[in-house]
Image (cartoon, rainbow, N blue to C red):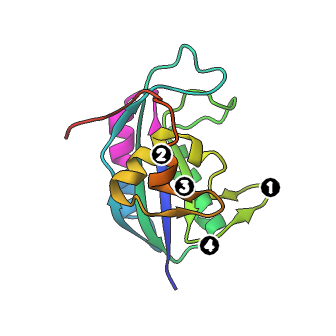
Amino acid sequence: MATQAWIGLGANLGEPLAALHGALEALATLDSCTLLRHSSLYRTTPIGPGVENQPDYINAVAEISTTLSATALLEALFAIESHFGRQRSARNAARTLDLDLLLYGDAQINTPSLIVPHPRMHERAFVLSPLAELAPQTLIPGRGRVADLIATLDDQGIQRLTD
């Protein structure tokens, strides 16, 4: 049985636009997955500790249907990141590509290698804005509906890019 999953995409090193387009192509051809749709691209200001001199990010979200387990999907996302030159150094470090498993059906998963829903997605406009573009009534288990959560956020320097 297939599960609906939401993937967060982001990049701010190298060619971020090309990386996101390439990642979407990779998701569309991923075994046991179907890319259903994706949001517009958004330019966002880096947030969090240690990001003061980083370039802006390009972010989006994608909805997929998959028969992979959450863990197998995460491993596939890591493989796509690696293909695009992702180096895992420090937390909040700039990156060529970041793919986050945001939601996996209505599952709540908490293991050493995977937490779903993504633990900070409800605080981040760069996740909620693209998600609200596609599915504002989506429920983030334990947090609430996307449309309600985004209304509580301060301006985080996000701008939708035109096609």
Where residue 139 appears, x then y in whole percent?
A: 52, 64
Mark 4 or mark 3, earlier in chain: 4
Q: Whole-Å distance between the Cαs marked 4 and 2?
A: 29 Å
> Badge 2 local density, few (<14 within 10 Å), some, or many (20+)?
some
Whole-number angstrom distance, CA of label 2 to CA of label 1: 28 Å
Q: CA distance from mark 4 to mark 1?
A: 16 Å
Could you classify mark 3 by the number of other residues whose Cα lies within 10 Å: few (under 14), some (14-19), or many (20 or more)? many
The residue carrying pointer 4 sits among few (fewer than 14), some (14 to 19) or many (20 or more) residues within 10 Å by Cα, namely few
Q: Which of disc 2 and disc 4 is earlier in sequence?
A: 4
Residue stretch rendered in magenta on the structure: 10-23
Residue drawn 74% across and 55% down?
113
Which comes sooner in the sequence, label 3 or label 2? 3
Q: Which residue does the numbered mark 4 point to in the structure image?
A: 69
Q: From the viewer's perspective, is the residue at label 2 or at label 1 nearer?
A: 2
Q: Is residue 50 above or below residue 60?
A: above
Which residue sits furthest bottom? 1
**Distance from the alpha carbon under mark 3 to that under mark 2:** 26 Å
Identify residue type, mark 3: Leu
Number of numbered discs on residues: 4
Q: Which mark is residue 77?
A: 3
Instruction: Name the residue at 51% across, 38% down.
Output: 153
Helix or strand or loop: what does disc 2 sit on? Answer: helix
Residue 160, given in percent of the width and then of the height, sits at: 30, 37
Identify the residue position indicated by label 1 in the image: 112
